[in-house]
Amino acid sequence: MIAVLKQDGKAGVVLPHGTLFRSGTEGKIRQALLEADLVEGIVGLPSALFYNTGIPASIWIINKNKTEAQKGKVTIIEYLLKE
């Protein structure tokens, strides 16, 4: 998705919550995205939010054109459902 974004493009990607902490290949990809300063924000979503799956998810906001104020930063929002 990053490869097809315009130079000033943004993308939102829904991923499993595990992409935030797993090591191995996912860890290497996450590290590369952060080092390239492409991640603008991450929204953590609760489990059982999507039909037919009980796993928690996250939305990663990718931005190829961060403002000066955003550079070197990632906004993280954790959304929790109250029972």
Image (tube, rainbow, N blue to C red):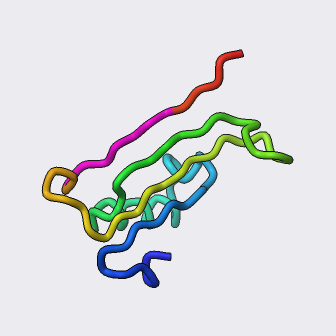
- Residue stretch in magenta: 72-78
Point 76% across, 37% down: residue: 48
Q: Name the quadrant containing residue 30.
A: bottom left
Kindly identify the residue that appears in the image at 72 percent across and 15 percent down: 83
55 or 45, which lies in front? 45
Verify whether residue 26 appears in magenta.
Answer: no
Task: Give the residue at x 37% y 81%.
Answer: 6
Residue that appears at 37% across and 73% down: 9
Q: Is residue 22 above or below residue 25?
A: above
Is 17 or 31 nearer to us in this picture? 17
Residue 80 position, x and y percent, is 58, 26
Does the magenta segment cover residue 76? Answer: yes
Is residue 26 or residue 4 the one in the foreground? 4
Question: Relative to 18, is 11 on the left or the right?
Answer: left
Q: In the visual, does 4 lie left or right of 66?
A: right
Placement of 32 over or under 2, stated as above or below: above
Q: Is residue 40 left or right of residue 24?
A: left
Q: Is residue 69 left or right of residue 54?
A: left
Total marks placed: 0
Coordinates of residue 76 in the picture (x, y in percent): 39, 40
Seen from this angle, which residue lies furthest top? 83
Name the residue nearer the viewer: 80 or 21.
80
Measured as percent of width and height from the top left, residue 4 is found at 46, 84
Instruction: Indicate whether 64 appears above or below 31.
Output: below
**Percent x, y for residue 22?**
53, 51
Which residue extends farthest right? 52
